[in-house]
Structures are given as C-alpha cells and as structure tokens.
Amino acid sequence: MSAANCLVTNDWICGEYLRTRSEELTDATVQHVGITVVSVLIGLAVAFPLALLVRARPRLAGPVLGLTTLLYTIPSLAMFSLLLPFFGLSAALVVTGLVLYSLTILVRNILAGLDAVPAEAREAARGMGYGPARLLWEVELPLALPALMAGIRMATVSTVALTTVGSIIGRGGLGNLIEDALPTFFKAQVLAASVLCVLLAVVADLLLLGVQRLLTPWTRIRTGPGGG
Amino acid sequence: MGIVTDAWSWLTTGANWEGDGGIGSRLAEHVYVSGAALLLACAVALPLGLWLGHLGKGGATAVNLSNAGRAVPVFAVLALFMVSPLRNAGYVPTVIALVLFAVPPLLTNAYVGMREVDRAVVEAARGMGMSGGQVFRRVELPLARPLVMTGLRSAAVQVVATATIAAMVGQGGLGRIITAGFNTYNTPQVVAGALLVALLALTVEAVLVGADRLLGRRAGNG
C-alpha cells in the first residue's frame, strides 16, 4: 500500500481514497439520490392537490401559502430535530422534512403555471365540451408545464443540498461521509462528498431540463387526441 | 402541547441562560455571526447589484449565481472550512459561509429592483438633463428601494436560519442549543432552540421593516 501515501498525508485530492472507498461513496450517493427522489415525488403529490384546492377556493390562498412559507423558514437543523419524536432515527424523518420544505416552491410554481394559462385556451376547450378533469389534464397542465418544471427543478436542487443536513441522524446520504470525516479532519472525504453532492444537483437539474424539453407543451397538444 | 410548555419552562429557567454554553452567550454568538455576515454580504452585493442594474448588464450572471448557490450545501461548505486551516480562525469560517449564501439573493434583488424601474421614467429624467449619477441617485434608487429591501429581509431571515447549521461542525450559535438537546434526547430543549431561532428571525425582520419605513418617510420628505 505504498500508493496510500495521500491518505497518510491527508491530501485534499486522493486517488487512493476514491479507489479504496468507492463502495462507500456509491452507497452514500445511492442513499442521497433515493432520499431526494422520494422527497420530491411525495412533495409533488402533496403540492398538487393543495394548489388545486387553493385555485378552487381562493380564500384558502392566504392560509395555505402562509403556512408553507412559514415551514420554509424553520431552520433545517431544528426541523429534523423536531421530527425526531415522531419518526425516530429513520429515513422517513429526513424525507418528511424535505417534503415540507419543497411545498413552498412547488405550490407557488404550480399555481403560477395554472394562472398563466390563457383564458381563451380554457374557453375554447370548454366550448369543445371538455369537462373539468379533461380540461386540467389535456389543456391546463401542458400549458402550465414550463412553470411547473421550473418549480420541480428548483425544489430538486435545493433538496439535494438539504439532504446533507439529514446526517445529524445518520440518514444524510453524502452528508454522512462529510460528518464522519470531520472529527479526523479527513480532507479527501469531505471534498469528494461535497463535490459529488454539487454534481448530483447539477446532473439532476440538467436531466429535468431535458425532460422539460421532451414534454414541450406544443408538441404534446399536437399529438394529443383531438377534441370531441 | 405538553412539549411546548416544557420548552417554555426550559426557556424561563434562569440557569439555562447563564454560563459559557448558556442561551445568553449562544444568542450573542448567533447575533454576532449573522450580523457580521449580513453586513459584509450587503457591502459586496448591494453596490454591485445596483451598479449592474443601472448599466443593465450581468443579469444572467446574477441569476446563475443564485441558482448555483442553491445547489451547494451549507453543511459541505462549513465542513470544507473546518478541515482547512480556517478552523483556527474563530467565527471566520461561519461568517464567510453565510456571506457566500447571502450574496446571491441580495445581488439578484438589487439587480431586478433596478431593472424594474420604469424605463420611461428613466428616459424622462435623462431628457431633463440629469447625468447618469443623478438618475441613479434621485430616480432609480428610490424606485428600486422596495425590492432591494425585500431582498435584504429575505437574506437576513435566511442568514439567521442558516447560522444554526454551524452547530453541526461544532461552531457556536443557537444551533448548539438544538444539537445539545438532540444529543441528550431533551426534546423540550430542541423546541426551545428552534423557538429562539424563529424569534430572532422575526425580530430581525421586524427591525428591517421598521428601518425601511423610517427610510421611506425620510426619502418622501426630502
């Protein structure tokens, strides 16, 4: 193990570290991606009905938006600590915290997207006999897609970053590696985990941008079934 | 609701306020670190954002910077500082990390505030023979003030909330009350710590709103 020199001298960049701990790095990355994906998906599943509810009953807009904004201002460290009595040391705790944080961005962006649908498009669809569900699914949603995807991208990128704070309960993906490396000032591990974390966020953002391009609303409308 | 009353009694116990790791010293650390970071961030971001907005250049850079800021975990930045020689520099690593995260929203809001100023008003001011500097001071700056202040408020609240993360790398501040409570399974203490951070954030917000009103009144009379 003469090549392990950089581990002994505690260099910032250490090829030997990446080689010998690749399994640990992969596991942490997989956990990180898993927590992020589940959080954003649940966040969407909660935010969507909330946004529809607010749209149907504008009087609820103040309380709902106020509450999600309030949640957003709770420091992440406090949020994860406060959820501990309810969830114990589990990934569900971190996911719950991250879902609560994502709501602000997601609800606002879904609402903004739906609000931006031109009234004429809505009228035209109604005139063609579209019911409320079909109107939402085939007309409003595709037209709201750019704002919706912008929200999903923002929420995903911040969720990737916030997941690291989950390391206080040992469920922080790459954050765990950072936390573990701190007591021994293990530079290579802190740097590698941090860089991977930022890379994850960038890759996720680019992937979602690609998805958004693929789902370009205009092509969708053209390929969708004609009105009846 | 029992936990909230427990948290309240923890907060109102005099002994918890005293000493080195007491609420008093943690609160002072938190205020010091957040205040220094916010001042430094303003000193960097506001002149730059206002100037770029006045010129109408660099908007894409400001937006990209905010997006990049969102992708970088605060915890990672703090950890990187703590394994570097910076760890021996007292509060410096926390302050630098907080500045890095406060600059993007301040910069973006200052820039957007300047760009949102009605172009017709700016043209009219120029037509009246105002120089670039006069347009900046007498027309653009007062009209951009509300948005700039909104950016300042959200940056301030964000800094106060983010400063708690410093506790994860063993730095001071109110976050230490939360982590200490967490490590000893003392949930009332965790709730008390979270309440203190929230109260501090609300106080900062109220002070800034008050300052904005005062500033607005003065500008209105002048």
Image (tube, coloured by chain):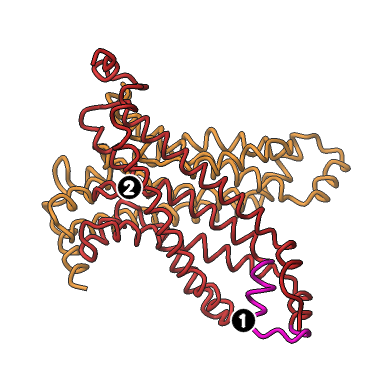
Q: Residue at x 41, y 52 (%)?
A: B204
Name the residue at the right extreme. B127
Q: Position of residue B71 (x, y in %)?
A: 48, 43
Q: Amino acid at mark 2?
A: Val
Say which element carries label 2: helix
Q: Which residues are magenta?
A: A126-143
Q: Which chain does the residue under circle 1 lie in?
A: A
Callout 1 amino acid: Ala
Percent position of residue B109, x then y: 60, 47
Residue at position x 80%, y 46% in the image: B122
- Asked if residue B61 lies in the magenta stretch, the reply is no
A197 or B146, which lies in front? A197
In what element is the residue under mark 1?
A: helix
Location of mark 2 (residue): A165
Compared across the picture, whether A11 is left or right of B220 comes to left
* Chain on which label 2 sits: A
Of the numbered discs 1 and 2, the one sitting upstream in the chain is 1
A195, above or below A224, in the image: above
Q: Quadrant of the N terminus of chain A?
A: top left
On the picture, is A80 further left or further right than A130?
Answer: left
Q: Colour of chain A?
A: red
> Where does residue A156 sit, x and y in percent of width and height?
48, 52
Q: Quadrant of the C terminus of chain A?
A: bottom right
Numbered label attached to residue A133: 1
Chain with colour orange in the figure: B
